């Protein structure tokens, strides 16, 4: 019996979530499975991958073949690197404590990288929000200034027309005096 580690779809239309399952290769995608070892949610940034690394490692060592997508996830979480190190221990190339040490160092480095990405995404989101707020404030101030200008010129032209009438009347009087 060929055993696969693959994804089984669940969730609603256009909002898929997946279970990471160990199943017979002949079983349908969402059908019967041997064991559920985790979940995968591609709708978040970065994608949420939760699975039992020990169970996945155990199935990989027994010969279960992951699909391409699951292989990428297992590689991302270090299960395939751990398998690589364990095969080295089995062959006698390295000792178990050295393999565990290497895996622990790799895992810490990978976790720091993931945490850095989450932090940078959070700060980028916050920066974008601040920029949008500043742009909205600028638009609001421009609108307030436009409203102020509309209200102020309505009062001023009345005063200007009175001044213009007085000035227009004065030259007319001087012309009449000059003519007389």
Image (cartoon, rainbow, N blue to C red):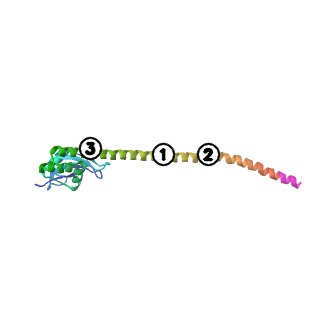
| SS of the residue under disc 2 | helix
Name the front one of labels 3 and 2: 3
Mark 3 or mark 1: name the one nearer the start of the chain: 3
Span of residues in magenta: 173-180
Which of the pair 66/61 is nearer the observer? 61
Q: Which mark is residue 151?
A: 2
Residue under pointer 3: 108
C-alpha gap between disc 3 and disc 2: 64 Å
Which of the pair 7/16 is nearer the observer? 7
Q: Position of residue 72 (x, y in %)?
A: 24, 53
Q: Position of residue 42 (x, y in %)?
A: 28, 50
Which secondary structure type mostly characterizes the magenta part of the structure?
Answer: helix
How many other residues sit within 10 Å of disc 1, few (<14), some (14-19) or many (≥20)? few
Name the front one of labels 3 and 1: 3
Q: Quadrant of the C terminus?
A: bottom right
| SS of the residue under disc 1 | helix
Q: Quadrant of the N terminus?
A: bottom left
Relative placement, left or right, of 84 versus 172 is left
Residue at image position (81%, 52%) is: 171
Residue 178 is a magenta residue: yes
Assess whether mark 1 and mark 3 are in contact (beta carbons under 8 angstroms). no
C-alpha gap between disc 3 and disc 1: 39 Å
Which of the pair 9/55 is nearer the observer? 55
Mark 2 or mark 1: name the one nearer the start of the chain: 1
| SS of the residue under disc 3 | helix
Most distant residue in the left direction: 1
How many other residues sit within 10 Å of disc 2, few (<14), some (14-19) or many (≥20)? few
Name the front one of labels 2 and 1: 1
Residue at image position (14%, 48%) is: 89
Most distant residue in the right direction: 180
Assess whether mark 1 and mark 2 are in contact (beta carbons under 8 angstroms). no
Residue under pointer 1: 134
């Amino acid at each position: 019996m060929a055993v696969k580690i693959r994804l089984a779809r669940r969730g609603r239309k256009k909002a898929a979530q997946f279970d990471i399952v160990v199943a017979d290769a002949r079983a349908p995608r969402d059908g019967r499975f041997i064991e559920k070892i985790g979940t995968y949610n591609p709708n978040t940034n970065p994608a949420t991958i939760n699975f039992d690394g020990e169970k996945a490692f155990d199935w990989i060592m027994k010969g279960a073949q992951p699909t391409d997508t699951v292989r990428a996830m297992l590689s991302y979480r270090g299960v395939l690197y751990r398998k690589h190190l364990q095969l080295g221990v089995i062959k006698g190339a390295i000792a178990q404590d050295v393999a565990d040490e290497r895996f622990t160092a790799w895992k810490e480095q990978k976790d720091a990288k993931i945490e850095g990405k989450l932090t940078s995404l959070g700060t980028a989101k916050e920066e974008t929000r601040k920029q949008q707020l500043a742009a909205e404030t600028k638009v609001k101030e421009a609108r307030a200034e436009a409203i102020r200008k509309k209200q102020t010129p309505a009062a001023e032209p009345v005063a200007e027309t009175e001044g213009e009438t007085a000035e227009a009347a004065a030259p007319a009087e001087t012309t009449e005096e000059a003519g007389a």
